Amino acid sequence: MSRKPRIHYPDAVYHVILRGNAGEQIFFEDRDRYRFYLLLQYAAEAYRCRIHAFCLMSNHLHLVIQVEAVPLTRIMQNISQRYTQWINRMRSRTGHVFQGRYKALLVDADAYLLELVRYVHLNPVRAGAAQTAADYPWTGHRGYLGNECLPWLTSDLVLSMLSPNGARARSAYAAFVQEGLGGGRRDAFHRGTGEGRILGDDAFVDDVLDRVNQRQGSAYTLDKVVDMVCAHYRLSSAVLSLPGKARPMAKARALAAAIVQASPHLRLTDLATVLERDLSALGKAAQRLTCEENARELVEQLVDELSSS
């Protein structure tokens, strides 16, 4: 739980990569991909995010997504949980579909969005799954060309970078993608240029980190963590200090401990004092919790919400 929380601010653009658990398949047939389309449409409508590009491969996927008020963590948690439920139900199975924490790279859209969209849409070509971008049906490429109706795909921003005229923009986009054929893997689109989670020049990285530092200058307190956890479980904060291991109080204490462990400015020792609990017991409870399915995503979501509040 020592990873840094996601960077969030309205209009932030991310390159998201989500892989199958242990490299296994995540899409087994066309109806799975169409189901994922529905989840993307729901996310775009419910969270007012914009999906600028996507690529669904058999064992991983790419998204270029721009958020507003709702953090990326919450959006991806909703998509991954609902898709996991779908696959497990359709295939009469249990367990994880996706491999732990997704990769999310914050991107300087002014400098990289156009190239990143091309890079994502050409992923099947680089992987040997298609000869051209148009040959592979499960990306946003055909939507950009106007050959497929994907109402949840936002293409206007990228196309406007090429021409103010719609037809000319689509033609320029097709030529731009064609020029990218034969291009190899771009490490910068996977690892970034700053802190391993930001893609941009030094000025962009500094600006992003300044935004984060300004929010964290008045970092959330231990009391806020306890209040948020109690709200999540619909409990009174007073009950967390009561003796016993009954649920959901024990679960709430474990979640609070996991959040504190993920927060560099907070100490588990202080939480143990507030909750009148043994320090090692809280640490073990947090460790057990984060081994549960979707628990890490929940911790990240709450940390993001605390950081941006």
Image: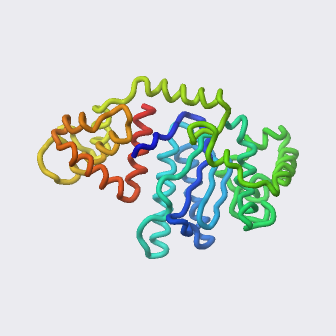
Rendering coords of residue 236 (x, y %): 21, 40
Q: Residue furthest left?
A: 243
Q: Give the colouring mode of the picture.
A: rainbow
**Left or right: 301, with 256 as reference point:** right
Q: Give coordinates of residue 43: x percent, y percent.
A: 55, 50
* Residue drawn at the location 43% of the way across and 23% of the way down: 217
Front residue of this view, candidates 42 and 200: 200
Quadrant location, the C terminus = top left
**Looking at the picture, does residue 13 appear above or below residue 244?**
above
Q: Residue visible at 33% across and 33% down? A: 266
Q: Is residue 34 above or below residue 17?
A: below
> Is 24 left, or right, of 280 in this rendering?
right
x, y (%) of residue 44? 58, 48
Residue 247: quadrant of the picture: bottom left
Nearer to me, 275 or 197: 197
Q: Residue furthest bottom?
A: 92
Q: How many numbered marks appear?
A: 0
Q: Vertically, is 192 above or below 266? A: below
Q: Quadrant of residue 184?
A: bottom right
Q: Position of residue 2 (x, y in %)?
A: 41, 43
Q: Nearer the viewer, residue 262 or 221?
A: 262
